[in-house]
Image (spheres, rainbow, N blue to C red):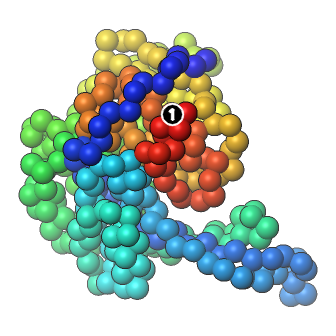
Amino acid sequence: MNICHPLPAMPDTSRARVLVVGDVMLDRYWFGEVNRISPEAPVPVVHVQRSEERPGGAANVARNAAALGARCSLLSVVGNDEPAQALERLLADDGVRTLLHRDPSLSTTIKLRVLGRQQQLLRIDFENAPAHEVLRDKLEAFKTLLPEHDVIVLSDYGKGGLAHVQEMIKLARAAGKIVLVDPKGDDYSKYQGASLLTPNRSELRQVVGRWRDDADLAERAQRLRAELKLEALLVTRSEEGMSLFRTDGSSVHEGTRAQEVFDVSGAGDTVIATLAVMLASGTSMFDAMCLSNHAAGIVVAKLGTATVTLEEMLAE
């Protein structure tokens, strides 16, 4: 079912001010050819011919917001290492203002993907949790940054960077800011009081259990929304599109707009970034959902963590 026909008009995004806070990572890609099996073990041998680096996690949310024309700031904790320097360089190229707190005991999270003939063969993760003292410093910086932004995005990847998420939500809501959360884990109580949560289908199942049909999903989603005192709950449902559950008890569903699905990694980042930019530009929650679904349909046709530009959004 598609209800956003025609698509809402794109607002002027140039004055939108978005603050992204959360877990950042560096996505590294090794591309190569696979022509033989290793004599040491029954695994393919990849002859690496090129590599790429892209900002991931909350950093990907920030670069997506900037690609849509917003003025975007990113607040996070990284290690005092080469991957952190790479992130800063890449984000500066993307027009993102970075405020990265250094923790010498932390290794900046890296997700290394090895691809052969455009197919992912292996992913290797490097990560550990940040120190409490650095997280407390980040919270103080958050308080300072609040007045400068319209919408706050809390991007939780479960790496420890949002240990003070409940305090952040309370501070932002008290300041009259819209707060969007991309949640993680099975305990959503820490996100209570946010404006909107954007779990995907599998993430929501961890919290509310399996649903029998759309009516059962709506009942469970509305119960969760009410318990958490949210203004809305947006469930991204992969090939089934997305569903928005609102305070008045109503819900709307938008079918998928993807023409070709190449890679879904990072699609959730694009959705919440687009929501943030559209809401900061003055659109309604419904119009923001329609435009976010449109953006997701574009980004899943790209390889890896990618962005959607204003030009691509306007092309339809």
Q: Please say if 182 is above or below 48.
A: above
Image coordinates of residue 151 in percent, x first then y, are 23, 42
Give me the residue at 40% from left, 53% from top: 67
Which residue is at the front of the view, 6 or 145?
Answer: 6
Q: Residue 115: x percent and y percent?
A: 71, 69
The image quadrant where one finds the N terminus is: top right
**Left or right: 301 in relation to 116:** left
The image shows residue 192, relative to residue 312, as above or below, that is above
Instruction: Name the residue beneath numbered marker 1.
Output: 293
The amino acid type found where label 1 is placed reads Asn
**x 47%, y 45%: residue:** 311
177 vs 257, left or right, is left
Q: Where, by quadrant of the figure, is residue 105 drawn?
A: bottom left
Give the vertical position of 101 relative to 175 (above or below). below
Q: Residue 41 at what x, y percent from top left? A: 86, 82
Q: Number of callouts in the render?
A: 1
* Left or right of residue 38, residue 101 in this image: left
Front-most of 244 and 8? 8
Q: Is residue 225 visible?
A: no
Label 1 SS = helix
